[in-house]
Image: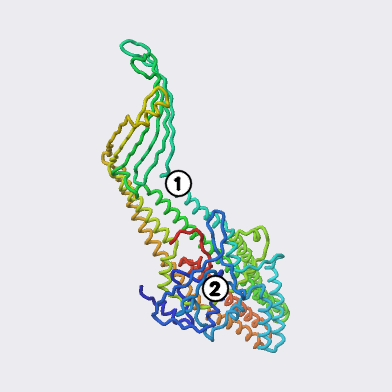
C-alpha cells in the first residue's frame, strides 16, 4: 500500500496523530483515562516517528469487571483504580519499551488545553472565564468606561445563562455515561437476546442426532369370507412394538425394536394349528445407509454448521450494535457539551448586543437616528432568537443522551440539567495510515459477518451438490422370532435365537432431468458468488470509512491553531476598538456590533472544530472496529475470532 500526500502532511504537523494499534489495544475505562494516560506519556521524552517508518506495536489487551445483561451476553467495563485514584486497567501489561503507547511531546509554543478551552467555557465555568476576561481588560486598558461596559455585559450574560439552569443538576462523566448506556440501553438489551436465540437453534440442529424412543400399538378385528363357501372367518388380534431409532452422522438410520402380538382365528380347529390364540415375539434390527445422495458427515451435519455460523454472525451483529450504540452515546455526550458551550458564547454576544442597543437608545436624542436605532435593535433581537434556539438545542441534546442511556435516574419525563464534566479533546495523536486500515480489516464485525456469509453459502452449495446425486440406499433388516401359546413362552422362544431371518436390499431413484436439484445447486452457487462480491464491497467501504476518518482527523487538528488565532484576533480587535474609541457615536457602535458578532462567530467555529476533532477520534476507533477496546469494553461468552 503506497503512501498518499496526506502522510507527508501528517508528518509536518506540529505534532502528529495517535500511535497505531494492531490486534490489541490498551485503553482506559473512558476517554478521560485515555486522555490522562496520553498526558502522562506526553510529559516524558518521546521521539517523533521518523519519516517513512511504518511500525505496528502490539499493545496489551484490557479486560475488566463484568455486567451481565438480560439475555446472558455479558459486557465488561473497567472500574479498578490505582492508589492515587486514577483508573487502572485490569489485566493490562506494559507496552513495548521501544515506542511510547500513544502520545508525542507537545511543542512548547502550542497553547495548553485549558488555555484553548477558556475561549469556549461551559455555562457552569463561565463565571471564572468572564472574570479572567475582565481582568485581562483591566490590564490592557485603564478606561473605566470599557470596564463598566464589560461589567454590564457579564451581568446580562449571567441572566441569559440562568435560562439554561434547572432546579435539578446532575454532573455526568463520559465513563458514567458509557456505563449507564451499556447497562440500560434498550437497543443493546434487545440485540443481546439474539446470540442466546442462535444458541438454541444450534442445540436444535444437534438434537437431530439424538436417539428417539418409539412405541406403536394396534388392534385389529377381521371378518372375511372364506372359500369355497361364504363361511365366516373371523380373527381378532393386537400388536405392540417398542424400540429406539437414531440418525447417525454418516446419514445411516439405525433402529432396534421388539414386537409382540396376539392373534385369534375363529373357525380353525386345533388339528390345523396347535396355538389358537397364538402369541408371537419378534426382535428387529434395521439399518438404512445412503450411498450417494445424503451420504457423508458434511451433508448430514450441515444444519449444525449453519447454526454455528448463525450464532457467530449473531454475536458479530451484537458487537456491531454495541459499537454503534456506544458511538451514538459518545457523540451525543460531546454534542451536548458543544450545545452548552454555544449557549455560553451566544450569551456573552447577545449581552454585548443588548448593551450596544442600550447605548444607541441613550444617544437617540443627540446623535442616533431612528434607522440606526432600529438596526441595532433588529440585530439584538435576531441574536436573542439565536440564543433561544441554542437553549432549545441544549434541551434536545439532553433528551437525545437520556434516550440512549435509558437510565431510570435520567428519565425523559424529568427536567434534569445534565452537565458533561469531560473536557473536549485538543491533544495531538500519531496515526499510521496503513496500520489503521489493516486493523480495521482485522477487527470490523461487518467484515467478519460477510466472511461468515461466504462460509454459509459454501456449506449450502456443498449440500445442494450432494442432492443432485441419485438416491442409492443400502438396507439391511434382521429379525429373530418366537411363537407360542402365551406371551411369556413366545418371548422365551425368541430369545433362543432359533428362527432368524434377514433381508438385504438396494433402493435406487432418480428424477428425470433432475431439474429441481440442479436449480438449487445453481442458486446456491450464485449466492456464494454474491456473498464474495458483498465481502469486497464491505471491505472497500471499511477502507473508505477509515480513510475519511483519518483525513477528517488531520483536517480538524490542523484547523485548531488558525481558528484559535482567529478567535483571539477577534477578541483583540474588539478590545482595541473599544480602547481607541474617543467618542461613543453611532458609527462606533455599529463597528462594535460587527466586531462582537465576528468574535462570537470565531468562537463558535473554534468550538465546532474542537468538537468535531473529539468526535472524529471516536469515529476513527469505530471505523477500525476497536471502539470497544478504546472504551475498555469486552463481550463475555464471545466466540473466538
Q: Residue at x 41, y 80 (%)?
A: 8
Tag nearer the camera, 2 or 1: 1
Q: Marks 2 and 1, how far apart in space?
A: 44 Å
Q: Nearer the viewer, residue 121 or 461?
A: 461
**Residue 132 coordinates in the image, percent (x, y):** 66, 82
Which residue extends farthest top?
229
Q: Quadrant of residue 590?
A: bottom right
Q: Is residue 633 above or below residue 574?
A: above
**Residue 42 coordinates in the image, percent (x, y):** 53, 81
Q: Residue under circle 1?
A: 204
Q: Residues within 10 Å of mark 2 (few under 14, many from 20)?
A: some
The total of numbered circles placed on residues is: 2
Q: Circles 2 and 1: CB distance less than 8 Å?
A: no
Q: Quadrant of residue 542?
A: bottom left
Q: Is residue 565 above or below residue 211?
A: below
515 left or right of 489 in image: left
Q: Residue under circle 2?
A: 34
Q: Residues within 10 Å of mark 1 (few under 14, many from 20)?
A: some
On residue 90, which mark appears?
none
The quarter of the picture where the C terminus appears is: bottom left
Q: Is residue 33 above or below residue 413?
A: below
Q: Nearer the viewer, residue 612 or 419?
A: 419
Note whether residue 115 is visible.
yes
Give SS at disc 1.
Answer: helix
Q: Which tag, 2 or 1, sits closer to the chain's start?
A: 2
The quarter of the picture where the N terminus appears is: bottom left
**Residue 324 coordinates in the image, percent (x, y):** 51, 62
Amino acid at each position: 500500500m503506497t503512501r498518499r500526500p496526506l502522510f507527508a502532511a501528517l508528518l509536518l504537523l506540529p505534532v502528529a496523530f495517535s500511535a497505531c494499534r494492531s490486534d490489541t489495544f490498551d485503553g482506559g475505562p473512558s476517554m478521560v483515562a485515555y486522555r490522562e494516560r496520553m498526558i502522562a506519556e506526553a510529559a516524558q521524552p518521546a521521539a517523533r516517528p521518523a519519516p517513512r517508518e511504518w511500525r505496528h506495536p502490539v499493545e496489551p489487551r484490557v479486560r475488566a469487571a463484568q455486567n451481565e445483561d438480560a439475555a446472558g451476553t455479558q459486557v465488561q467495563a473497567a472500574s479498578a483504580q490505582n492508589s492515587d485514584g486514577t483508573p487502572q486497567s485490569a489485566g493490562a501489561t506494559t507496552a513495548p519499551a521501544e515506542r511510547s503507547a500513544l502520545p508525542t511531546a507537545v511543542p512548547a509554543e502550542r497553547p495548553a488545553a485549558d488555555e484553548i478551552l477558556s475561549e469556549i467555557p461551559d455555562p457552569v465555568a463561565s463565571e471564572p472565564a468572564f472574570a479572567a476576561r475582565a481582568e485581562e481588560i483591566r490590564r490592557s486598558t485603564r478606561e473605566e468606561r470599557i470596564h463598566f461596559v464589560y461589567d454590564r455585559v457579564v451581568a446580562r450574560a449571567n441572566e441569559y445563562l440562568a435560562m439554561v439552569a434547572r432546579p435539578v443538576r446532575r454532573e455526568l462523566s463520559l465513563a458514567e455515561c458509557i456505563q449507564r448506556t451499556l447497562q440500560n440501553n434498550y437497543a443493546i438489551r434487545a440485540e443481546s437476546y439474539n446470540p442466546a436465540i442462535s444458541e438454541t437453534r444450534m442445540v436444535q440442529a444437534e438434537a437431530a442426532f439424538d436417539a428417539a424412543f418409539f412405541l406403536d400399538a394396534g388392534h385389529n378385528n377381521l371378518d372375511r369370507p372364506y372359500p369355497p363357501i361364504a363361511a365366516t372367518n373371523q380373527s381378532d388380534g393386537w400388536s405392540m412394538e417398542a424400540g429406539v431409532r437414531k440418525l447417525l452422522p454418516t446419514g445411516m438410520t439405525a433402529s432396534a425394536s421388539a414386537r409382540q402380538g396376539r392373534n385369534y382365528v375363529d373357525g380353525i380347529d386345533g388339528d390345523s394349528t396347535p396355538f389358537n390364540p397364538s402369541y408371537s415375539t419378534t426382535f428387529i434390527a434395521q439399518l438404512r445407509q445412503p450411498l450417494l445422495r445424503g451420504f457423508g458427515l458434511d451433508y448430514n451435519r450441515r444444519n449444525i454448521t449453519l447454526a454455528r455460523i448463525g450464532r457467530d454472525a449473531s454475536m458479530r451483529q451484537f458487537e456491531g450494535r454495541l459499537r454503534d450504540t456506544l458511538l451514538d452515546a459518545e457523540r451525543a455526550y460531546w454534542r451536548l457539551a458543544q450545545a452548552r458551550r454555544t449557549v455560553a458564547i451566544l450569551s456573552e454576544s447577545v449581552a454585548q448586543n443588548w448593551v450596544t442597543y442600550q447605548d444607541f437608545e441613550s444617544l437617540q436624542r443627540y446623535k442616533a437616528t431612528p434607522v440606526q436605532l432600529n438596526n441595532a435593535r433588529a440585530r439584538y433581537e435576531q441574536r436573542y432568537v439565536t440564543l433561544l434556539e441554542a437553549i432549545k438545542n441544549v434541551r434536545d441534546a439532553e433528551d437525545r443522551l437520556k434516550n440512549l442511556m435509558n437510565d431510570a435516574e435520567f428519565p425523559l419525563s424529568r427536567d434534569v440539567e445534565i452537565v458533561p464534566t469531560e473536557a473536549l479533546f485538543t491533544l495531538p495523536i500519531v496515526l499510521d495510515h496503513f496500520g489503521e486500515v489493516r486493523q480495521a480489516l482485522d477487527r470490523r464485525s461487518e467484515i467478519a459477518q460477510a466472511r461468515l456469509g461466504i462460509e454459509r453459502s459454501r456449506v449450502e452449495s456443498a449440500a445442494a451438490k450432494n442432492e443432485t446425486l441419485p438416491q442409492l440406499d443400502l438396507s439391511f433388516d434382521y429379525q429373530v422370532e418366537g411363537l407360542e401359546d402365551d406371551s411369556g413362552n413366545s418371548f422365551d422362544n425368541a430369545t433362543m435365537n432359533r428362527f432368524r431371518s434377514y433381508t438385504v436390499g438396494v433402493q435406487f431413484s432418480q428424477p428425470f432431468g433432475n431439474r429441481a436439484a440442479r436449480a438449487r445447486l445453481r442458486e446456491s452457487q450464485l449466492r456464494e458468488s454474491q456473498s464474495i462480491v458483498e465481502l469486497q464491497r464491505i471491505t472497500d467501504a471499511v477502507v473508505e470509512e477509515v480513510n475519511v476518518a483519518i483525513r477528517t482527523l488531520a483536517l480538524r487538528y490542523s484547523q485548531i491553531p488558525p481558528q484559535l488565532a482567529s478567535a483571539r484576533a477577534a477578541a483583540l480587535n474588539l478590545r482595541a476598538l473599544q480602547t481607541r474609541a474617543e467618542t461613543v457615536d453611532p458609527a462606533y457602535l455599529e463597528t462594535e456590533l460587527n466586531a462582537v458578532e465576528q468574535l462570537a462567530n470565531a468562537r463558535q467555529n473554534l468550538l465546532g472544530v474542537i468538537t468535531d476533532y473529539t468526535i472524529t477520534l471516536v469515529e476513527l476507533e469505530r471505523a477500525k472496529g476497536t471502539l470497544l477496546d478504546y472504551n475498555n469494553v469486552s463481550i463475555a461468552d464471545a466466540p473466538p475470532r
